[in-house]
Image (tube, rainbow, N blue to C red):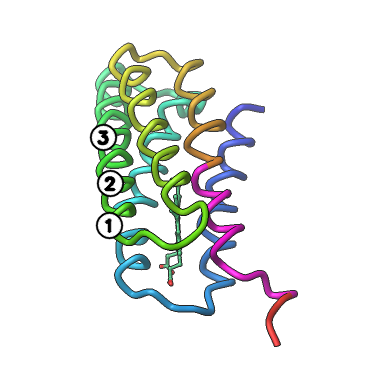
Amino acid sequence: MRRTLLALLSTFAAGAAVAQVTTHDLAVQALMATKVNPAALAFWAGGNDPPEGETAAQAEARWAAALKGAQDLQAGGRDLLKHSRPGRWDEFARLMIEGGEKGEAAARAKDMDAAFLVGGDQVYNACNGCHKTYIPTPARLP
Ligand code: HEC
């Protein structure tokens, strides 16, 4: 269950955004593609069920990547504040920073449940909230 949920969340975050961009912002797009999205995927993998047959060394590597992902989400949120827009932009950027901070604590503790919760709450809500607000939906296109 858990793994399916996070797979869906990450697919949505990536796929929905790519399909719906109309007011193109190359700097923000690059930030998403090279930093925010990989960071989120690495962090979400911390809250997922471990892959079948994962070795102890692989688990270490997965948690290390999740920790770096959580730190990169904080840095990405700070970068987003530099690209501020009118409205709720900064609120979502700060939510992403908060998610990254809580996520960092969860990843340091290798606490799968805490990583799952923060991944589905602050982290996901930051992505989804900002995308829904700032990336027009296809239905609203001319
Ligand atoms: C504060 C606003 C904001 C937050 C928070 C945010 N995004 Fe985005 N994202 C955008 C905007 C705006 C675009 C469209 C950029 C463009 O191409 O003009 C975008 C685009 C994307 C893209 C498409 C990139 C491409 O190659 O076209 C992906 C993937 C993405 N975001 C993932 C994420 C994920 C995952 C998160 C959460 C961890 C997240 N975003 C959080 C604003 C945000």
* Residues tagged 1 and 2 counted as in contact (Cβ below 8 A): yes
What residue is shown at x 59% (from left), y 59% (from top)? 133
Please state which of the two labelled residues, at mark 2 or mark 3, is closer to the viewer. Answer: 2
Q: Name the residue under label 1.
A: 82
Q: Quadrant of residue 73?
A: top left
Q: Mark 3 points at which residue?
A: 71
Placement of the C terminus among the 4 image quadrants? bottom right
Regarding mark 2 in the picture, which secondary structure is present there? Answer: helix
Regarding mark 3 in the picture, which secondary structure is present there? Answer: helix
| Identity, as a three-letter code, of the amino acid under mark 1 | Lys
| Identity, as a three-letter code, of the amino acid under mark 2 | Arg
Q: In the displayed structure, does residue 114 sit left or right of residue 59? A: right
Q: Name the residue under label 2.
A: 78
* Residue 132 magenta-highlighted: yes
Image position, residue 125 (x, y; %)? 56, 40
Tag shown at residue 116: none
Q: What stretch is highlighted in magenta?
A: 126-139
| Identity, as a three-letter code, of the amino acid under mark 3 | Gln
Which of 122/94 is in front?
Answer: 94
